[in-house]
Amino acid sequence: MQYDELESRLRQNSQRALFNYWRRRATRHGLPVAKDFHLNDLREFCDQIFLIKVKREAARLRFRCDYAGTKVVLHLGQNPKGRWIDEVLSTQEGSVLRLAFVELTALKRPQLLKREAGLSGPQGRIEEDLLLPCIGDNDMVELIICHSTTLNRFAEDTDNQEVRQAVWGLFRS
């Protein structure tokens, strides 16, 4: 996916700003270097991001949360800092994110991950994560910056079937 195409799919101003910050730091392989990122630089995004360290254990990759913003902590109901992703998230959600992280680590390009969560009635939400890989030692992905956003399924609250179908078409594309 081209960077401009991904940028055009970002709905949140904070996602676009973070993505452009990430692009400005891009160097080798079109990816920024992990050590060039400092939490102070990410201050305006801090409440909605979590930083994931990639750990290689034998033939498998593991993902540990190195930082979680206040909105991420509130959403999870716990602070995942220092814990493995598969220990923090539910089995289904953890599996989805783990697969996305593995793919991101292999492909070395940013992704926008959308998934449905809490779909019981009008309380349902769309979870959207902007995943930004950063290169570490040995040209391997070492850090993943995730910007999390929760979008309400407002289309369910309307009686207009055409509007509902149009909005859901946007989310499912």
Image: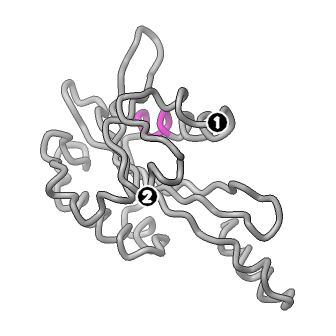
Q: Which residues are magenta?
A: 101-106
- The amino acid marked with disc number 2 is Lys
Q: Residues within 10 Å of mark 2 (few under 14, many from 20)?
A: some
Report the amino acid beneath label 1: Ser
**Residue 57 magenta-highlighted:** no
Viewer-nearest of labels 2 and 1? 2
Q: Is residue 84 above or below residue 51?
A: above
Up-down: is 122 above or below 164? above
Residue 2 image offset from top left, x and y in percent = 41, 61
Q: Secondary structure at mark 2?
A: helix
Name the quadrant of the C terminus. Answer: bottom right
Classify residue 47 as left or right of residue 111. Answer: left
Left or right? Give the position of 10 relative to 94: left
Give the residue pinned by disc 2: 71
Does residue 12 sit above or below 24 in this rendering?
below
Q: Residue at x 73, y 66 (%)?
A: 123
Disc marking residue 150: none
Q: Which label's residue is closer to the chain start, 2 or 1?
A: 2
Mark count: 2
Depth order, front residue of 154/100? 154
Q: Secondary structure at mark 1?
A: loop
Q: Residues within 10 Å of mark 1 (few under 14, many from 20)?
A: few
In the displayed structure, 98 sits above or below 21; it is above
Q: Which mark is residue 90?
A: 1
Res. 40 image quadrant? bottom left
Residue at left offset 24%, top offset 37%: 135
Question: Percent from the top left, x then y, of residue 75?
Answer: 53, 53
